[in-house]
Amino acid sequence: MNYVIYGEEGYQVKNAVNAAIQKEIGKRDEMNTVVYSALETSCEEILADAQTISFLTDKKCIVVEDSEFLSAKDSTGFLLEPLLEYLKAPMDSTVLILTGSFAKPDMRKKAVKQILSFCKCIVCNRLDKNSLPAYVKEQLQKRNIQVSPACFRLLCERLPYDVGMIHNELDKLELYGDTITESLIKQLVTRSLEEDVFALVNAVVNKDRRQCFRIWRDLQVLNKDPIYLIVLISSQFHLLYQVKCAMLQGMNRQDEIAEQLGVHPYRVKLALGICHRFTADDLLKTLNRLADLDQSIKAGKVDKTLGLELFLLRGDTV
């Protein structure tokens, strides 16, 4: 059996490759598994290895990473026809696994469609707002972790769409027993930089100077560049402006606005708690101030740290 394993979720692609190797040849080691990159190794060289009998094991596995030649954005120069001819009559002692980080194959190419027809295809695309809760629930059940409906919602809100990061966060929670509380989730599940920046924005609009500078000092400890933070703050105010415009168009449901804007529902939930207090013009003026600040810093007129701190201190911000 030969495989095509692709998708934007690298953690799942890696696990799927290991599972395929385990199924086909048993424990993976240097003697039975060879890894190539389609960006660095030619089709001819890979196929020559695939057609060579394994001397030390009954079967061997060849993993071809970066198989972007199956997608519309191919920059590998990999030859499809020789690969297709091989797959029509593959070596029984070789398992060929093609992997790539593309979201979907280019089904407009006849050769790609034929290659896929000769392989077992496994898709590992990123989670989204619809699939994340089911995945988290499945992982909690595997770990025998019990959570209340309210805690489950909070956990899903704080977790990213990245499977690898989800496993890291759940591994931490698992160390604290089989029952997880809201307090434990807030203490252990890592806040994203985006969430910290939104907390900073919330402090700005509330004119809470003490909270502004507490968060800013925490971000300084993490070596976050002021210019980068100004960009993130601008992004958050842009989201507030978009949500405000959506509300003015008659949208009031969190999921509806999130789908319209293509952002995480939790971000919209936070935005809804702020933007109803301001007009669209208020938010647009703040965006313009941030744009002017960014230009002044890049022109050397204002020190970046001082510029950010002055923005945080301004009483007329929104």
Image: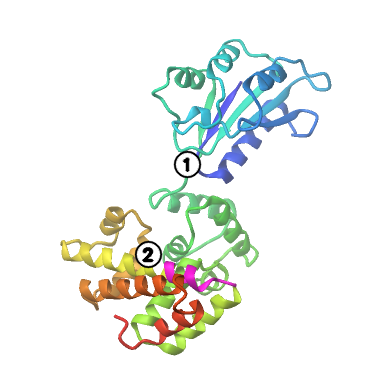
Q: Residue at x 33, y 88 (%)?
A: 315
Q: Is residue 96 above or below residue 28?
A: above
Magenta residue check for 111: no
Identify the element where label 1 is drawn. Answer: loop
Give the class, few, some or many, for how many residues have Cα within 10 Å of label 1's Cα (few <14, many ≥20): some
For the C terminus, which image quadrant? bottom left
Residue 60 occupies quadrant: top right
Q: Residue at x 40, y 87 (%)?
A: 313
Residue 248 occupies quadrant: bottom left
The answer to whether 56 appears left or right of 108 in the picture is right
Q: Is residue 312 above or below residue 72?
A: below
Outermost residue toward the right in this view: 56
Q: Nearer the viewer, residue 69 or 52?
A: 69
Give coordinates of residue 47: x percent, y percent. 66, 18
The majority secondary structure of the magenta stretch comes to: helix
Residue picked out by circle 1: 125
**Dot 2 amino acid type:** Arg
Q: Residue at x 48, y 83 (%)?
A: 306
- The residue range painted magenta reads 223-231
Residue picked out by circle 2: 267
Identify the element where label 2 is drawn. Answer: helix
Residue 238 visible (yes or no): yes
For the N terminus, which image quadrant? top right
**Dot 1 amino acid type:** Asn
Give coordinates of residue 106: x percent, y percent. 43, 28
Q: Nearer the viewer, residue 183 or 104?
A: 104
Magenta residue check for 226: yes
